[in-house]
Image: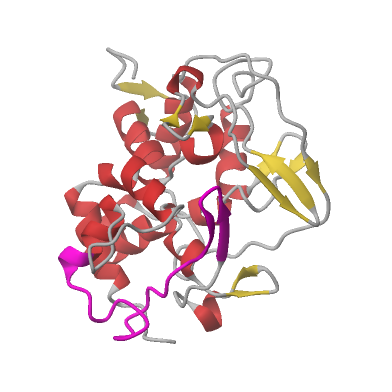
Amino acid sequence: MVAGLATIALAGYGGAADLSRGQYLVEALAACDNCHTPRSPNGYDFSARFSGGSQTFAEKDYVVRGPNISSDREMGVGSWSDDALRAAIVAGVGRDGQLAPPMPSDSYRALTKNDLDSIVAFLRASAPIRAPIPPQRRAGFWSPHPVPGAEAPFEVAALSDRQKRGLYVASIARCLACHSGETDGAPDHANKLGVGGKVFTTPAGAVAASNITAHVEKGLGAWSDEDLKRAITQGVSRKGEPLKPPMSTLAKAHFARMSAEDLDALVGFLRTIPAKE
């Protein structure tokens, strides 16, 4: 995105932030544009990238939209400190208090220190867009629900293990935040890991997240690795039918950019989710 700036050193935080790595994380795994870039039926409006999302998330305790996270100093995050940005990303805490649950900080807790720095650097390098901050209403407190095993930052060395890398990718891509069953409106990883059922309301209608456990009939147990990879990156089911949004949107706009190594690791991890109906 920014020619000639492959690496930016971040003083006082140890190590360096790689812009290309930050771009990959933002675009292929975390899918930040999905909530923070305006879009139409034709896709994202990258001329206004990170200026704020089009979708409103409304529940009894909050009404929010993805805010401006461009580098604009007044309306975006250009004046935020690196620590403030990190806190928003992995702890769900903004400069004016706790962020609402649509910000998937629970899933980003696993980010390695360097990967988190790389995301911050990539956001810093984005074009400043002066777009009004949408009205936000937040009340109450929301407990974190990270994926088991991904509650804290990973060490880089752990990612050389295929199974741990798969868990890392699954956490950042929010696979289980969407596909685990819920109790009292929150993911119940302890009892409903991967069983699906969460309902998403989109312009195309309401759709329930699929079961992604190893169950042969209800889940992915009968799917081949190629079936899974096609669903993840192309938004196409085992039978060749197009999946519904939001999975189809995420697959085509984001997960299609996933590296072969990360995709293989993710499929391997999904195979380990115990079968449940």
* Quarter of the picture holding the C terminus: bottom left
Q: Is residue 2 magenta?
A: no
* Quarter of the picture holding the N terminus: top left
Instruction: Inspect this view and state whether residue 160 appears.
Output: no
Above-or-below relation of 63 to 205: above
Question: Which percent across, then down, holds residue 213?
Answer: 37, 78
Q: In which quarter of the image is residue 22?
A: top left
Q: Quadrant of residue 198?
A: bottom right
Question: Which percent across, then down, holds residue 276?
Answer: 42, 86
Above-or-below relation of 265 to 92: below
Indicate left or right for 176 with 272 as reference.
right
Q: Is residue 213 magenta?
A: yes
Indicate left or right for 121 with 251 as reference.
right
How would you classify the magenta stretch by its main secondary structure? loop
Question: Which percent across, then down, holds residue 225?
Answer: 18, 68
The magenta region covers: 199-227
What residue is shown at x 71% (from left), y 42% (from top)?
64
Above-or-below relation of 263 to 36: below
